Amino acid sequence: MTGQGILSRTRRQAWADRWSARRAALLIALTGPSAIRWPEPRLAGDPRRGRWLLEGRWRIGAEVFEAPGIMPWDLAPEMPEAAALHGWDWLDDLAAVGDARARALAQTWVRDWIARYGRGTGPGWTPALSAGRLLRLLGHGAFLRRGADALEEPVLVRVVARDAAFLAGRWRSLARPEMRFAALTGLIQSGIALPGRSASVERIGRSLVREAKRAIDAQGGTPSRNPEALLACVGHILDASHAMTAAGRPPPPELAAAVARAAPVLRTLRHADGSLARFHGGGRGGEGALEQVLAAAGRPSVGGGRPPLAMGYLRLAAGRTTLIADAAPPPSGAASCTAHASTLAIEVTSGRRPLIVNCGPGHGFGRDWQRAARATRSHSALELDGLSSSRLGVQHPGEEGARLVEAPRRVIAEITPLSRGLRAELAHDGWRASHGLTCARILRLSPDGSRIEGEDLLTTLTRADGERLDRALSGARGLGLPAAVRFHFHPDVEAELEDHMVHLGLPNGERWVLAQEGAVDVTIEPSVHLDPGALHPYPALQAVLHLRVLGASTRLRWTLTRSKGTSGALRDLGPVGFRDESSEEASA
């Protein structure tokens, strides 16, 4: 489809959204119900963000606003990210605080939104925002109907019915699988809760089964390779199944089969601290969300366990240490619009403490941060000549970001059990067409998890590769091509450089040493940690091992070793998380 065709399609979708929203509002105004069976609350927010809202502190894109007393939709309405406020995710956070002040503020904002936009007008009437709003209305109905400023039930019921009527005709226009699951889950819950709508539940359940078969493949993965997106899909399936079971309607067995396919993948992508690996636009997952999903999914069957390679990710685990690597080609086509150039990047966690990370998803902090987070230099991986292993193309209208182009076509991943631990051999050809070089990474994890040995290699494989490399080197004036192996550290990790070795300290007292052989220089440089739920990007550090490519083979060996002074049975009882809000403000 041409760019003009895509633009026309996007305009048609916007027109269809507006028409469907106003039609739904008119229909419910004439025939809408006045009662509802409110479902059991199953949504969890972040009380930290809820307290920021009570103080009038907002982040929209990369901008932070101090605006107590103002309605959310009056904040920077010209910014594209401001539309997300119409999805009401802030309601989760205020409900997580749960006191009278938080409840009164939530009631004020909901009442104002209904007065302004409840008749089907405004920027909030898109399928994605409507799905979020419907789930939160159903999940927090009891919270909004308590106290002196309680919202009247018939008012809330009409909004539920309008969103459900709107979504019933528009959910198919959602591109991302997790949003389609959210919309269908909201429709199932509302069909059970609203009188006279139960006949639609079976039909929507069949749609959910079709989406589960399409979005979760036979190996339990999803096309975007986004771990957090897979978690969201499974979470919505479980919520829909729970609603049907509670209403005495056995959920289709295909839904349980989809959860059973995905659960081993999620277990593979779980770090020792309980968080998800952060790759391809995904974050660590909401607090407790992964554990809740895995508990609901049940224990793996005999022989099920964790696959060594799941959704293209490799997991090595021993002792207190987990290492997860991106070991497959990145997503392609429309599924790549939020994907990252992270091939062969790693993350390492020791017990409850993240050690080596990637910068994070970047979404929510504005387009510049999101684009920067997708580059190879924002990951703990090798970067060649300032060029990412996958490049960004053009952004299609209606998509969240530019698609990946010139990505690795072939990625190799092999795991070998050793008598002294585990060995993984990885390789990709992302720079073969441009520089004639294939990138390989070898990883070894000791049996007790106290030592990781790594080797990064750039090499030519054929005569044609050598000719491409010669052409690339001819423009370097004899200085060689710059390359760098980066290790981004979690914000809680302290790093000091001494004798070309990087000494790392964790808050629990653990000490690690990053040593190397083959780098022309080692530096500690600023980095950033992008947590979608934070007000600001967190400042962090990274170790950069600099290389010069002068010929057909360039090799770097490195080790990451836990200090002998650290006990393998260390009791880590201290708080886990970033610095407190005051220090965060000071750093910003």
Image (cartoon, rainbow, N blue to C red):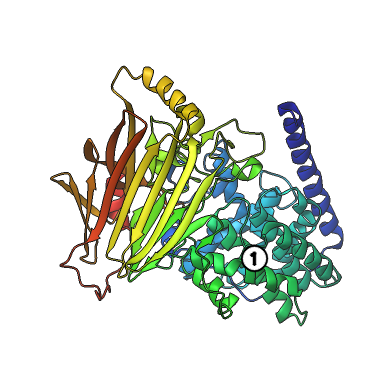
Locate residue 39, reporting x and y percent: 67, 75
The answer to whether residue 80 is left or right of residue 322 is right
Q: Nearer the viewer, residue 193 or 148?
A: 193
Q: What residue appears at the point 17 percent right and 66 percent down from the top-left corner?
A: 564
What's the amino acid at mark 1?
His
Name the secondary structure under disc 1. Answer: helix
Q: What residue appears at the point 24 percent right and 74 percent down from the top-left corner?
A: 570
Task: Check the image and report above or below for 464 versus 209.
Answer: above
Locate residue 502, reporting x and y percent: 20, 49
Q: What residue appears at the point 81 percent right and 66 percent down from the top-left corner?
A: 206
The answer to whether residue 365 is left or right of residue 16 is left
Quarter that holds the C terminus: top left
Location of residue 316 by image quarter: bottom left
Which residue is at the far left?
499
Locate residue 158, reporting x and y percent: 75, 62
Q: Nearer the viewer, residue 224 or 10?
A: 224
Locate residue 309, reporting x and y percent: 52, 60
Residue linked to disc 1: 236
Which residue is at the far bottom?
248
Which residue is at the far front?
463
Residue 57 shows in this picture: no
Quarter that holds the N terminus: top right
